[in-house]
Amino acid sequence: MKILDRIALVLVIIGALNWGGVGLFGFDCVAFFCGGQMAILSRVIYSLVGIAGLWCITLLFREDGDA
């Protein structure tokens, strides 16, 4: 697995855990640790997680030898 794929997967897992926290407990870890939802660092993290999610879509369509 390429390093970019691993980074994307880690970011997607972080995003999934964050959304799980929001859904189950109403607690946004990223906003808590980065100074609120509209803080620049939070927005950067949210953007990176979103881009990583788009990248991970490509994992579904790759041949076995490509991954």
Image (spheres, rainbow, N blue to C red):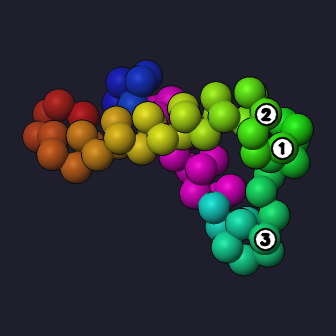
Q: Which mark is residue 26?
A: 3
13, above or below 21, in the image: above
Q: Nearer the viewer, residue 2 or 22?
A: 22
The answer to which of 11 and 37 lies nearer the viewer is 37
What amino acid is at disc 3?
Gly
**Tag 2 and tag 1, C-beta contact below 8 Å:** yes
Q: Quadrant of residue 46?
A: top right
Q: How far apart are labels 2 and 3 at the CA level?
A: 18 Å
Q: Quadrant of residue 37?
A: top right
- Magenta residues (range): 6-18
Q: Residue at x 66, y 34 (%)?
A: 43
Q: Which residue is mark 1?
A: 36
The image quarter containing residue 22 is: bottom right
What residue is at 17 percent from the left and 31 percent from the top? Answer: 66
- Lower position in the chain sequence, tag 2 or tag 3: 3
- Whether the magenta-drawn stretch holds residue 7 is answered as yes
The correct choice, above or below, for 60 with respect to 27 in the image is above
Q: Secondary structure at mark 3?
A: loop
- Which residue is at 77% across, 57% downward? 28
